[in-house]
Amino acid sequence: MREMARGLAKGNYPMEASEQPCVVVVDDEQPVLDVMRLKLNAAGFDVHVATNGHDGWALIQQLEPRVAIIDYYMADINGVEVCQRMLDHEATADIPVIAITSKYETQAQDMQAMENVVEFVPKPFSSRKLISLVRKLAGIMDPTPRWSD
């Protein structure tokens, strides 16, 4: 994963699991949005969704989320363009992006050049793995120690 510390930059400091970090999901497939919203909400995230790149970019600018999950292929502007717009604006340049794609082999190469893309997740994806990745990038600390006294 590219510089996971990037997710902790610009005020994205580790937090307790009781806080609800904001996550923006941009995908033009409603079933994918529905599943991600349901799973991420259940995991304690404040989830906002957009069904196209223009609306997604507007949400990202407005909310400055802890993490953005962006589909590569969308009808209006694609994930590469949304990521580039994020990089071009100081307030959004350090937001880590998880790129999701149904054509991993070809589309991942295009998004590799985007320095804010820290992980590629092929569709279909494991909700459990996606939630784990979002938690790491959002800087959520596990409130339960993994050791015993």
Image (cartoon, rainbow, N blue to C red):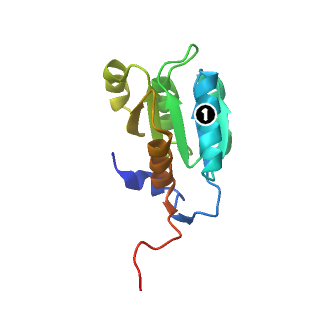
Camera sees residue 79: yes
Query: Residue drawn at (55%, 65%), measured in percent from left and top?
Result: 15
Query: Residue drawn at (33%, 45%), measured in percent from left and top?
Result: 2
Residue 8 placed where, x, y %?
46, 57
1 horizontally vs 40: left or right = left
Residue 134 placed where, x, y %?
50, 48
Camera sees residue 85: no
Q: Amino acid at mark 1?
A: Val
Residue 50 placed where, x, y %?
65, 29
Number of marks in the image?
Answer: 1
Relative depth, front residue between 15 and 17: 17
What is the residue that sits farthest to the bottom in this orientation? 149
Residue 106's place in the image compared with 83, above or below, is: above
Query: Residue drawn at (53%, 57%), measured in percent from left and top?
Result: 12
Q: Which residue is mark 1?
A: 35
Residue 36's place in the image compared with 22, above or below, is: above
8 horizontally vs 36: left or right = left
